[in-house]
Amino acid sequence: MTTSRRAFLAALALAPVPFAAVAEAGALDRAIAEATGGRTPTDGGVTLSAPTVAENGGQVPVTVTVESPQDGTLHVTAIHLFATRNPTPGVASFRLTRAVAKPEVTTRIRLAEEQVVVAIAELSDGTLRRATASVRVTTGGCLS
């Protein structure tokens, strides 16, 4: 009986790891779906600049630039930022108008640990474009 109880306790100790990963993925998917109305973005047309290694997770510089003519027919209406492993994955949303000459935003974000940052640009025709960048954080900036 002791052997099976030990096996059960060992399995129970490992159980939170996969469930936590599923919970994080679910939170990220919900945040992206909420920001995009459930539409699926395509890769390309967006440049996401972030450091490969961030010394301080409390202030990670990020720049998002979108390739768009910004004319009367097509322009960027929003840029959304997500952090895949933060306690709250939705980091920021920026609303833009066609009056913005260059669809680019620069900000500093907080990252809890090594993760992928996702930028999604929303265009006036309803299409979504996406870019990602991996960032390794040496000192986390978020507390869960």
Image: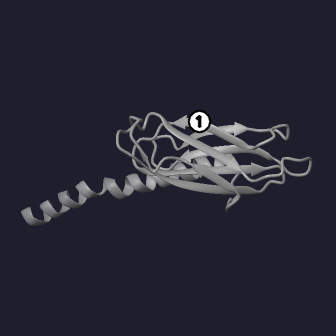
In the figure, is residue 120 to the left or right of 50?
right
Compare residues 139 and 8 and report the one nearer the observer. Answer: 139
Figure quadrant of the N terminus: bottom left
Q: Quadrant of the C terminus?
A: top left
Point out residue 98 in the picture as x, y percentages from the top left corner. Answer: 85, 41
Q: Residue at x 16, y 64 (%)?
A: 7
Are there few (<14), some (14-19), or many (20+) residues within 10 Å of tag 1?
A: few
Residue drawn 83% across the image and 51% down it: 69
Task: Identify the element where label 1 is drawn.
Answer: strand
Query: Would residue 65 be found to the left or right of residue 75 on screen?
Result: left
Q: Nearer the viewer, residue 19 or 120?
A: 120
Q: Is residue 78 visible?
A: yes
Q: Residue furthest left?
A: 2
Residue 11, quarter of picture? bottom left
Q: State whether residue 41 is above or below residue 85.
A: below
Q: Is residue 1 at all visible to an observer of this figure?
A: no
User: Would residue 131 appear left or right of 121 to someone viewing this image?
Assistant: left
Residue in the picture at 57% in, 48% down? 49
Q: Residue furthest right?
A: 72
Q: Quadrant of residue 102?
A: top right
Residue toward you, 54 or 115: 54
Residue at the image point whose x is 42% and y is 36% from the top: 142
In the rendering, at what x and y percent does residue 60 appear?
Answer: 49, 39
Q: Which residue is mark 1?
A: 107
Query: Which amino acid type is marked by label 1?
Result: Thr
Position of 16 with respect to 49 (left or right) is: left
Please provide percent x and percent y for residue 15: 30, 57
On the image, the x and y values in percent for residue 13 come to 23, 54
